[in-house]
Image (spheres, rainbow, N blue to C red):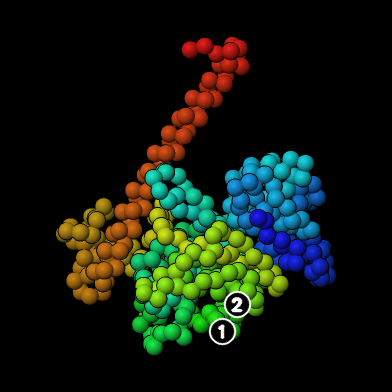
Amino acid sequence: MVRDYSQFLPTSAKASPGTSKAQTALSRLGWQAFFAQQTTVDDMARTPPVRVVEVHRNGLHVIGDGIDTLIPPGPEATVGDWLLFEADAPRQSRVLHRKSLFSRRAPGKERKLQLIASNVDTAFVVTSCNLDFNVARLERFIALAFEAEVTPVIVLTKIDLCEDVSPYLDAARAISDRVAVVAVNALSEQPVAALSDWCRPGQTVAFLGSSGVGKSTLVNALFHADRVATQAIREDDSKGRHTTTRRELHITPEGCAVLDTPGMRELQLADAERGIEDVFADITALAAGCRFNDCQHETEPGCAVLAAVEAGEIAPSRLDRWRKLAAEDRFNSASLAERRAGDKAFGKMVRGVKRVQREHGKWRP
């Protein structure tokens, strides 16, 4: 079922002097100079920009200035993408270069990359102050955001059910000095004020985290209404139930694009080396002082990282988590590279067969 976005389409927005109605409408959907630079006036007139707000099995739900439609599968697009809409041939709509892209290794045994969302400015990594709180999981999401070149913000929820939020705040702040940490009661008015610096008109924000941490509740808080459904967590282990079943972009009346995502049971990082280095910037900096360039920080002599652990400057558990993420990323990246090489070789063979068929008629082995 395709959601009706008509009440949120910004076609009624008032344009400022020198700004067209279409430009104002697009800016409220997250249109920025980065995308405008990829188009011309003629492009905009012939193929108006539209943004993907949902991905269905039977097509892409896109909205734009006075446009709200479902186009058939064709371009490889994900939620948040901007397309130049070909009304007469929707499958040929062109995906504009992305400002940012969230991706992961697809769950299961398939060796392929799954696109999660694109063109996000800020990622709210949400976790609750209960048994769900997990530093390793937060580091994964933050590495994902850094690799995507998106600003991460840790949001602690359910503080009204926690006797002392200080340990959670301290643990979250210790992850990276580049990541802001805010604590809110998602059921109150706190989120609107606490997140306002990032939820400005024209910005795109995403809520990431496991099920039951309050992502959908935070989305509802920004809308001052029950925009998306919510469910209670299980009391025995604080685990959540899946409420959001697919990634979906919502547009607030103020013009902020808000992405709600399903809880991710499996977040396998791939091609995220830089993101991991950014999360563990302290270890990365120390590694530059190791005696050997290929030091694995395990038993090598002259290892600056191990020396920092012995001195109490780096917690052994943090080093262990870095090793695990780095090893996982190397394995998944190598697997994906092997898959890409195989696909490339297969594609080359197919093109060769087609060329023979064109040159010699029906091809016989």
Q: Report if residue 178 is visible in the image.
A: no
Report the front residue among 157 and 226.
226
Query: Which is nearer the N-term, disc 2 or disc 1?
Result: 1
Indicate the amino acid at tag 1.
Answer: Ser
**The disc label shown at residue 188, or none:** 1
Mark 2 = which residue? 221
Q: Report if residue 339 is visible in the image.
A: yes
Q: Where is residue 288 in the image (x, y as percent from the top left)?
A: 30, 61
Q: Position of residue 5 (x, y in %)?
A: 72, 62
Report the front residue among 237 and 60.
237
- Horizontal arrangement in the rendering, residue 131 relative to residue 258 (left or right): left
Q: In which quarter of the image is the N terminus?
A: bottom right
**What kind of element bears circle 2?**
helix
- Horizontal arrangement in the rendering, residue 117 relative to residue 273 (left or right): right
Q: Position of residue 297 (x, y in %)?
A: 23, 59
Residue drawn at 47 percent across, 47 percent down: 113
Residue drawn at 51 percent across, 82 percent down: 185
Indicate the amino acid at tag 2.
Answer: Ala
Q: Is residue 330 above or below residue 342?
A: below
Q: Are marks 2 and 1 in contact (CB under 8 Å)?
A: yes
Q: In which quarter of the image is residue 66?
A: bottom right
What is the C-alpha distance between the residues marked 2 and 1? 8 Å
Q: Which residue in the rendered view is the most extreme toward the bottom?
A: 163
Q: Is residue 113 above or below residue 324?
A: above
Q: Position of residue 211 (x, y in %)?
A: 46, 67
- Horizontal arrangement in the rendering, residue 27 relative to residue 182 (left or right): right
